[in-house]
Image (tube, grey):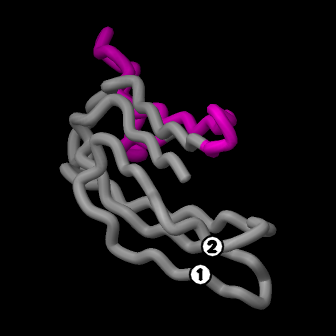
Amino acid sequence: MYDDDGKKQTNHGRKIQFELITFSSLTKKSKQVIEVKNNGGNYPGKPDIRAITFLLIGLPKKRRKFLLMAMTCLKKLQWDETSKTLQLKFQCKNDDEKNAIMY
């Protein structure tokens, strides 16, 4: 995900200011890990805390344990048995360059 302040910032030799957030997933010993990383970029008006929502669809069952690494706050954890969908809403500080969810 690319984010900036929406203003052209290449004039007068100024450095382009933006934040790039990447998402990746991998399996470790039957556990799923979702990583959220940012490039440490900065721009005027960048929020101090970013809210992110994941919908994990088609899980075989509700997981009982979640490990949040470097996350500020888990806001919502909701399981839908019919659709086998887990909704995770959390907030992370923008100064954390790497966050992860393991389930």
Residue 1 visible in the snapshot: no
Q: In percent of the image, x 30 and y 49: which residue is there?
A: 71
Q: Residue furthest bottom?
A: 82
Residue 80 in the figure: left or right of residue 34? right
Q: Local crowd at mark 2 within 10 Å, few (<14), some, or many (≥20)?
A: some
The residue shown at (23%, 54%) is: 72
In front of the other: label 2 or label 1? 2
Q: What span is colored magenta in the figure?
A: 3-32
Disc 2 marks a residue whose amino acid type is Lys
Residue 70 included in the magenta stretch of the image: no
* Picture quarter with the N terminus: top right
Residue 32 point in image, percent of width and height: 63, 44
Residue tagged 1 = 79
Q: Amino acid at mark 1?
A: Trp
Secondary structure type for disc 2: loop
Taking depth in this image into account, of 3 and 56 the one nearest to the observer is 56
Q: Is residue 23 magenta?
A: yes
Q: Quadrant of residue 96?
A: top left
Residue 20 as seen in the image, left or right of residue 96: right
Is residue 52 visible in the rendered structure shown here?
yes
Where residue 62 is drawn, which disc sits there? Answer: 2
Q: Please give the name of the residue rendered at 78% of the width and 67% of the height, measured from the top-left corner.
A: 60
Residue 4 position by quadrant: top left
